[in-house]
Image (cartoon, rainbow, N blue to C red):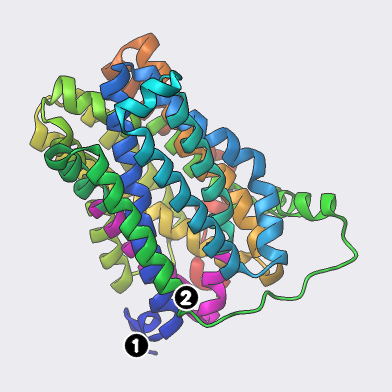
């Protein structure tokens, strides 16, 4: 029996470089998300305004997601990643300008300019995601897909820990302008790393297909595959109902009383749990019983969110968010590996874009749902409701997807 090498994929030069790009660009995205959230809370003190940040990002994201997958399969993926990273840089420059009260008073538009940049960020994410997922599959051989998904998740979550913590500390001690300047620095460094990745050509595509056929082919592929549809649906509804991240500024300010510095640690706690789980999975991947672990992990995530809503102790809340990250990352790695193993090379961009609609947009729509539910039901009851709905979703999908319950990733390689 061949010995499992937990670090095999890190020996691939281009994968290391691209993983480093993802690390720094993710720090930038996460920092900016926290800074915008706290800035919006300081300006409005309204939970619905925080929820609308998610909606402002999700609507543009969804509107271009299918087309972005087509673009990722047709055009050079590295160029797409580079150009849309530059567009993200432009948005950060606008947010920096909007952080000056004098300019905002001159525009007399309230917080609308901030929502405009958030919408721009949604478009950027829609084009980055399928190109990133498709390119990563080209950087490593097929037998390392599970290993690459694990390390990609590890590095992403380390960045997602660092970004909110760093953003909260810089915002709290040095102000909003300093936080946006640091975001700019991270984006520029990420772009410099991307420059050194070797150029990869896209796999051949079917030229006889029309644009409409190409845009819909990814949807047809996913909806005809019970395993892919089940994994995407499970994560989508879990994040949609169970996400409490959008409401963390209010928990930090009004329940736990820890300010922007504490908010940074609250945002980072799930990511720390996810990193530790990734390191464990790198050594002991849940391959043979992946379906069982998928359902257990999402149920554990829902229970962690319910307990977090009840907690009034900062350290207990940190621990519960940490546990939510532990459970969530099991499902993330299983879904990512399944997506890579079941998707043909020439369709990776389009299938990834469908996955982004299921998963990526659910984060932002989930933020809107959290804000609206908090407005109607109250903060704590709304989060308890969301975690409870996650458990209901686990039960329904477990019953409807027998193939997913029996998922064995080793059999797919």
* Label 1 secondary element: loop
State the mark number for residue 379: none
Q: Determine crowd level at label 1: few under 14, some 14-19, many 20+ residues with C-alpha closer than 10 A.
A: few
- Image quadrant holding the N terminus, namely bottom left
- Image quadrant holding the C terminus, namely bottom right
Whether residue 82 is situated above or below residue 392 in the rendered picture:
below
Q: According to the image, label 2 marks what residue?
A: 195
Whether residue 107 is situated above or below residue 80 in the rendered picture:
above
Cβ–Cβ under 8 Å for marks 2 and 1:
no
Mark 2 or mark 1: which comes first in sequence? 1
Query: Percent from the top left, x then y, of residue 323?
Result: 23, 45
Q: Which residues are magenta?
A: 133-162
In this view, the residue farthest toward the right is 208
Q: Nearer the viewer, residue 279 or 43?
A: 43
Whether residue 397 is situated above or below residue 325 in the rendered picture:
above
Whether residue 77 is situated above or below residue 39 in the rendered picture:
below
Q: According to the image, label 1 marks what residue?
A: 3
Question: Quadrant of the rendered structure where residue 318 is?
Answer: top left
In space, the residues marked 2 and 1 are separated at their CA atoms by 34 Å
Residue 309 appears in the picture as rendered: yes
Question: Quadrant of the rendered structure where residue 177 is?
Answer: top left
């Amino acid at each position: 029996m061949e010995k499992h090498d937990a670090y095999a994929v890190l020996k691939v030069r281009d994968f290391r470089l691209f993983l480093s790009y993802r690390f720094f660009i993710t720090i930038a995205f996460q920092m900016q998300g926290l800074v915008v959230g706290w800035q919006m809370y300081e300006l409005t003190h309204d939970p619905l305004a925080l929820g609308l940040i998610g909606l402002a990002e999700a609507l543009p994201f969804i509107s271009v997601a299918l087309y972005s997958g087509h673009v990722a399969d047709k055009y050079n993926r590295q160029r797409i990643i580079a150009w849309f990273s530059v567009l993200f840089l432009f948005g950060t420059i606008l947010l920096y300008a909007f952080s000056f009260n004098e300019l905002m008073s001159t525009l007399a538009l309230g917080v609308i300019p901030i929502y405009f940049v958030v919408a721009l960020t949604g478009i950027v994410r829609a084009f980055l995601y399928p190109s990133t997922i498709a390119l990563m599959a080209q950087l490593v051989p097929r037998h390392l897909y599970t290993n690459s998904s694990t390390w990609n998740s590890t590095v992403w979550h380390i960045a997602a820990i660092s970004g909110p913590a760093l953003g909260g500390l810089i915002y709290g001690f040095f102000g909003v302008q300093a936080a946006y300047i640091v975001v700019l620095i991270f984006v520029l460094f990420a772009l410099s790393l991307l420059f050194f990745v070797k150029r990869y050509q896209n796999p051949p595509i079917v030229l006889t297909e029309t644009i409409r056929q190409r845009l819909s082919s990814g949807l047809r592929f996913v909806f005809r595959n019970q395993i892919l549809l089940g994994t995407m649906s499970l994560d989508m509804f879990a994040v949609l109902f169970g996400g409490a991240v959008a409401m963390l500024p209010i928990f930090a300010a009004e329940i736990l009383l820890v300010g922007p510095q504490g908010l940074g640690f609250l945002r980072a706690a799930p990511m720390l749990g996810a990193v530790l789980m990734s390191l464990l999975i790198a050594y002991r991947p849940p391959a043979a019983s992946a379906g069982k672990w998928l359902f257990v992990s999402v149920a554990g995530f829902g229970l962690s969110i319910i307990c977090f809503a009840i907690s009034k102790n900062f350290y207990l809340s940190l621990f519960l968010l940490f546990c939510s990250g532990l459970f969530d990352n099991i499902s993330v790695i299983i879904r990512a590996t399944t997506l890579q193993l079941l998707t043909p090379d020439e369709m990776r961009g389009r299938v990834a874009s469908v996955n982004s609609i299921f998963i990526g947009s659910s984060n932002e729509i989930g933020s809107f749902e959290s804000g609206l539910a908090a407005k109607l039901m109250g903060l704590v009851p709304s989060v308890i409701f969301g975690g409870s709905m996650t458990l209901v979703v686990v039960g329904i999908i477990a019953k409807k997807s027998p193939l997913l319950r029996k998922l064995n990733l080793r059999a797919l390689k």
